[in-house]
Amino acid sequence: MKATNDIYKQSFSFPSGTVQCLFDISFDEQFPSPTVIITDENVFAFHQNKFSNTKTIVIPAGEEAKTQATVDYIINQLIDLEISKEDTLLGVGGGVVSDLAGYAAAIYKRGMKLQLMPTTLLGMIDAGLGGKNGVNVGRYKNMVGTIYQPEKIWFCYDFLSTLPVHEWRSGMAEMIKHACIADEQMFDMLEKIQLEDIMGDFKKLNELVQRNVKIKMNIVEQDELDKSDRHLLNFGHTFGHAIEKLLGITHGSAISIGMVCACRVSEKLIGLHSSATQRVLNLLEHYLLPLEANTNSEELFELLVKDKKRVGDDIHFVLLPQIGQAKTEIIPLSYLHQNIKEILR
């Protein structure tokens, strides 16, 4: 996919400063070289030529690398390279890289300049946006981290040419989530097209990426520190994160199942119509995303009670009154425990 000469920009404001999103850029022709890059082994292997003129820290690929030990390795590399806090760290990769790069930048010398370049659809529309970062602790996702906004997020679609199809599907799960909570028109659009249409049509891809970036970043602008409105972005994630950790499946696959669970809870608690639930299931299935998990319900619940959104014996849970709208309610963990087999059916 060839970038145009003009870069389309969107800017979003936070108390800590402005985040500029720059779309359809060419890494080779339009991207100014940062001081140091963090990327993973997979991205480096596919695009090694892009990193030849910049100091580069290469970390292992995959969720297993999202640990404090990897952050310690990055910090030691930054020290060895004599990187200052006025230098710019660029994270080039998927969600794991953006989480680790953001966390390392936030704590290195109490904060250095940060930019991100997501290389997956999931990273472009979700994981690389909003400033959240951090690491897993054992089985528990994102237990340690910060909120630290990058100065710029670069969208270079060339990286998607090497993206496996299952990673495209993983990104589609988050796109469907955004449609469910905030954009019924996009939901309608996604029902009418195929994944191949998005993968093969630059104009459609660019339109959808920008639309999803705006949805997420507008929500984060209202609630950067995740006290209220930002909770809406967790639709499907309460069950999804637990399923992801328990089964070791892709983030998008787990969130797909989590959204199915959230729709069933929404039917019971706030009257989401069963036809709306069926539309969500049909759309997930349309993009070949899973609808159910073969897992031990008690083990899953053990992970649920360690969720960051837990408050005492209750949990903040995102519910869907209708497609295109969402709300957060505090519900008892005991309700989820008593009904977990029905929710997971």
Image: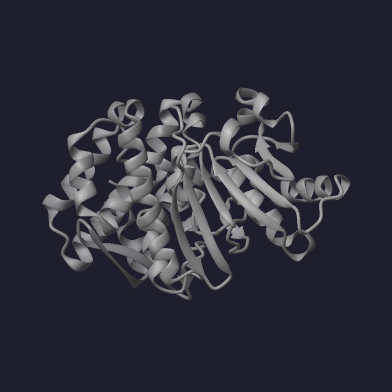
For the point 28% across and 28% down, the residue is 197
Relative horizontal placement of residue 323, taking residue 332 as reference (left or right): left
For the point 71% across and 51% down, the residue is 88
For the point 83% across and 48% down, the residue is 76
Relative horizontal placement of residue 157, taking residue 17 as reference (left or right): left
| Quarter of the figure that contains the N terminus | top left
Estimate the x, y position of residue 194 in percent, counting from the top left. 25, 30
Q: Vertically, is 25 above or below 102? A: above
Q: How is the image coloured?
A: one colour
Which residue is more in the foreground, 261 or 13?
A: 13
Which residue is more in the foreground, 121 or 290?
A: 121
Q: Vertically, is 329 above or below 74? A: below
Q: Is residue 217 visible?
A: yes
Q: Vertically, is 298 above or below 283? A: below
Estimate the x, y position of residue 29 in percent, counting from the top left. 58, 32
Relative horizontal placement of residue 334, taking residue 39 as reference (left or right): left
For the image, the number of numbered tags is 0
Estimate the x, y position of residue 168 in percent, counting from the top left. 40, 33
Relative horizontal placement of residue 237, taking residue 307 as reference (left or right): left
Q: Is residue 136 visible?
A: no
Res 233 quadrant in image = bottom left
Q: Vertically, is 339 above or below 221? A: above
Which residue is more in the foreground, 58 or 157?
A: 157
